Amino acid sequence: MANILILGGDGYLGWPTAMYLSSKGHEVTVVDNYFRRNACLNLNIHPLYENLNLIDRARLWHELTGKEIKVVIDDLSKSEVMNNLFNSKIDYSWAINPNEKNIPQSVIHYAEQPSAPYSLMSQDKSEFTLLNNISVTHNLIWSIKEYSPDTHLIKLGTMGEYGTPNIDIEEGWLNINHNGRSDKFLYPRQAGSIYHTSKIMDTDLLWYAVRMWDLTVTDLMQGPVYGYKTDQSEIDERLNTIFNYDDIFGTVINRFVVQAVCGIPLTIYGKGGQTRGYLNINDTLQCIDKAIENPSKKGELRIFNQIMETFTVNELANKIQAIGNNHGHKVEVNNISNPRKELENHYYNPTYQGLIDIGVTPHFLDDNAIADLFKTVEKYKNNILKELIYPRVKW
Ligand code: USQ
């Protein structure tokens, strides 16, 4: 079993990943600065249900399973904080055995401001997104280089780095023939938000660290994730991950189900032909797990497109409307003016074979998956604040 460090362990994906890897017997340490909680508090955004803080969740996890998830609450954009995770000077906020200080074999990097709308709310939030995201990645590559050069860095990138080009999207790389010569380059990036731009800059840092310092890196280009339920959260609902349905931190499928339940017509932005690759939260866990089990080579920047299927927004709305109607809701859909500058009708043909090849078995957005989401949202229906639903940030 491995020592695994999860940066951003309080987030939508970080906490389920921590429980999943801990349940498999790994020694897991999570680090978080509570950015997302504080941003929600400052913006008066309430998730669908309350979540225990990270220390209390880790305590509860230990009480229920006997397994330990160590917690560090601190800011990874400070280089000393990051260094201490790798040079055995780690300062735990909570741990049962704080003296066991092991160098991580794998580090999963989720510790970023994850929202495109947040990054465009104002100049200072845009600046925060860029500086925070790039500094954390920058600190991480330095710490690994200095103290732990064999650690496998698994970084969450985003499919949005590629944008929506009018050619097929490869897994990270593109062979180019030019004036009779050929070479392989990072697939062209063209982001649609400052958040996505920060992820492109991360990729450049990773590529530098691999080329110049021989680090071992897997970059997972993830699409929008849906769902909240995992085998571990089933143990006790107080272990559930955060569920945002607002216009800033909510992603489209989770948002549409909430809208269906509270009687707001589904907010299709523009014509609704925008196509993206989606995945179930359980597949995020599988992808991380398989990436840990099958590390990239030293000096290799391995890139996987982390999606399981593609849909237009209209297709999503139709599916959710149909299941919602079966559940007794009268679901309407509404094409509202698109708050984002994005193509609403475009070619989209990404490859996503690499993760399947290393053993990931996809879950699909079938009727059961959507019905499951409806059941939870219906349970918390009284918590829904309708004023959080319509988009308030335009770009
Ligand atoms: N959309 C609607 N109506 C809504 C919300 C979204 O039509 O009420 C549309 C958007 O215009 C967009 C698509 O649905 O075309 C996806 O939007 P989203 O808000 O679910 O996802 P996005 O802003 O792209 O960002 C999310 C995560 C981010 C991750 C990214 C993957 O917040 O962390 O990197 O998905 S990707 O989209 O592939 O870049």
Image (tube, grey):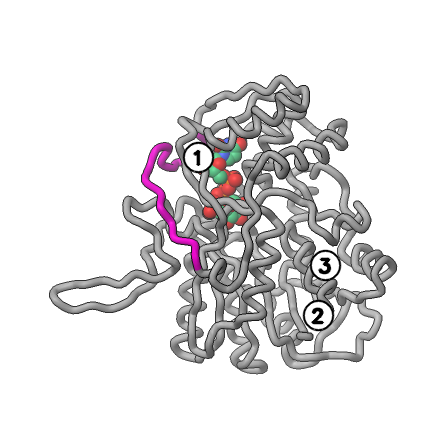
Question: Residue at label 1?
Answer: 312
Q: Amino acid at mark 1?
A: Thr
Above or below, 307 against 344 in this view is below
The numbered mark at residue 19 is 3
* Mark 3 and mark 1: Cα distance apart in space: 32 Å
Give the label on residue 26, or none. 2
SS state under label 1: strand
Asked whether, in this view, residue 338 is left or right of residue 81, the answer is left
Residue at 65% from the left image edge and 52% from the top image edge: 11
Number of residues whose C-alpha sits closer than 10 Å to that of mark 3, classed few (under 14), some (14–19) or many (20 or more)? many
Q: Earlier in the sequence, mark 2 or mark 3?
A: 3
- Tell me the crowding category of disc 1: few under 14, some 14 to 19, or many 20 or more residues within 10 angstroms, Cα based: some
Which residues are the magenta region? 338-353
- Residue 32, percent across and down? 67, 60
274 or 199, which is in the foreground? Answer: 274
| x then y, percent, for residue 5 | 65, 69
Q: Given the image, on which type of amino acid does mark 2 rest?
A: His
Q: Secondary structure at mark 2?
A: loop
**Picture residue at 53% right of the left edge, 81% below the top:** 149
Q: Is residue 257 magenta?
A: no
Residue positioned 53% across, 62% down in the render: 359
